[in-house]
Image: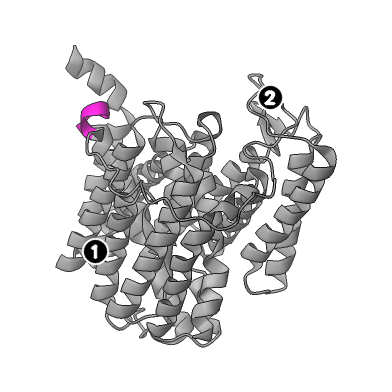
Amino acid sequence: MRGGLVTFVTMAYIVILNPLILGGFSADQAAVDVAGNWLPNAQVAAVTALTAGVMTILFGLVARLPYGFAAGLGINSFLAVSVVGQVTWPEAMGLVLINGVIIVILASTGMRELIFNAVPRQLKIAITVGIGLFIAFIGLVDSGFVRSSGAASPPVQLGDQGSITTLPTAVFVIGLVIIGVLLARKVKAALLIGIVATTIIAVILESIFKVGPSFGVNPDGWNLNAPVVPTEIMAVPDLSLIGQVSFGAFDRIGMLAGVMLVFTLVFTNFFDAMGTMTGLANEAGLADKNGNFPRLKSALIVEGIGAVAGGAASASSNTVFIESGAGIGEGARTGLANIVTGVLFLAAMFFTPLTEIVPLEVAAAALVIVGAMMVSQIRHVDFSEFSIVLPVFLTIIVMPLTYSIANGIGAGFVSWVLVRSFSGKGKEISPLLWVVAAGFVLFFVRGPVEALLGA
């Protein structure tokens, strides 16, 4: 029970952070989809807490393991940045739901393990690192720490003309330092404590200096909401986003582009969850020498259901959180810990007005920290062989520079197949990887192909 409480404390930041990534307080402050629609912050917070609570409890009851569930940070950023510019929010959530159904099928048939084994370990590490760098870059941009220069070269710059000049960006730096120090000192719930502490600082500074929101015209203002204490802290949760799902993405952007988006979602969900669960099992002493743990198949199936539930509720795909390791460190070993964590998430639904206090600059600091955690996996990459180094490097660097996880994965797969093959190591490449790489080649040239087919 103590472990379940600690897991909730370390994960609770997602109820604040997920709405800031997926939602907004007005159309000019949110991730607007191709049809001009956006997700209200309070509604996203409510469904985020609901799905996290339900999926955490379900996993505890079925898999009987102490792994907390919530909206995955990699996928929600991918949806907000890369997907909704092409489709509507309901269509994006439809893709997430399809992704979950595919994962459930793969897990049920045993294919998930086969596919996992087909991708080289070095590329799996590179994808984790690339997503981390991508998330960190989003945080740096959202905070105003990195801005467009408006010139061809350099395309980006530090702050305003190479200098940090705004109070919101200074708050971001303060938050980055606070959370970083807490993590370095191994303080449990460092992210949550850091977000709360920095938000309090932001509220105090805003009450003194009256900076106000930017609204796209005030470069010195807060990027999203100004940190002001709400008139109420409790409210009946607005769950109207549940069921707002459409499968019209394939008609809107074409079958090939739709399939590649689903593939990216499946791949991200697929490897992030399996790696996280294996790592947590090792930490809890539940894994065998091959990294397998009890009720593996059940765990993988429920993880897929998390994506289905997240898509159906417009909360983004729900997956295992590495922060569960804090609860395991406090003694969590069974599904009872998940029951405690899940009940606390359900209670959090009634406190969603508190999310309106947190400015985007504070959330951006948490994003950079999470990115740093993921980038630290680069220490496991083998840098002794250049046929490994180049695909790994392309996977990592293409993601943030093109603002696309899909592009990074594709660059890594294609370069791995080509460079390794022409280096005399083609026999080591799985035929399945060849098929996936060929699909990415089509994805990269889909513009000319679609034009040719149209002609």
Q: Is residue 261 visible?
A: yes
Q: Residue at x 50, y 45 (%)?
A: 41
The residue at which mark 2 appears reads as 149
The location of residue 357, given as percent across then percent down, is 64, 49
Question: Magenta residues: mostly which secondary structure?
Answer: helix
Look at the image and say whether residue 254 sits in the magenta stretch: yes
- Judging from the image, what secondary structure is the residue with disc 1 in? helix
What amino acid is labelled 2 in the image? Ser
- Check the picture and name the quadrant holding the C terminus: top left
The number of numbered badges drawn on the structure is 2
The location of residue 117, given as percent across then percent down, is 28, 64
The residue at which mark 1 appears reads as 112
State which region is magenta.
250-255
The location of residue 244, given as percent across then percent down, is 30, 43
- Judging from the image, what secondary structure is the residue with disc 2 in? loop
Task: Name which quarter of the figure residue 123 lies in.
Answer: bottom left
| Closer-to-camera residue (277/193) | 193
| Closer-to-camera residue (55/291) | 55
Q: Residues within 10 Å of mark 2 (few under 14, many from 20)?
A: some
Q: Residues within 10 Å of mark 1 (few under 14, many from 20)?
A: many
Q: Is residue 269 found left or right of 43 in the rendered image?
A: left
What amino acid is labelled 1 in the image? Arg
| Closer-to-camera residue (379/142) | 142
Residue furthest left in the image: 109
| Image: 455 above or below 311 | above
Q: Residue at x 45, y 49 (%)?
A: 44
The disc placed on residue 34 is none
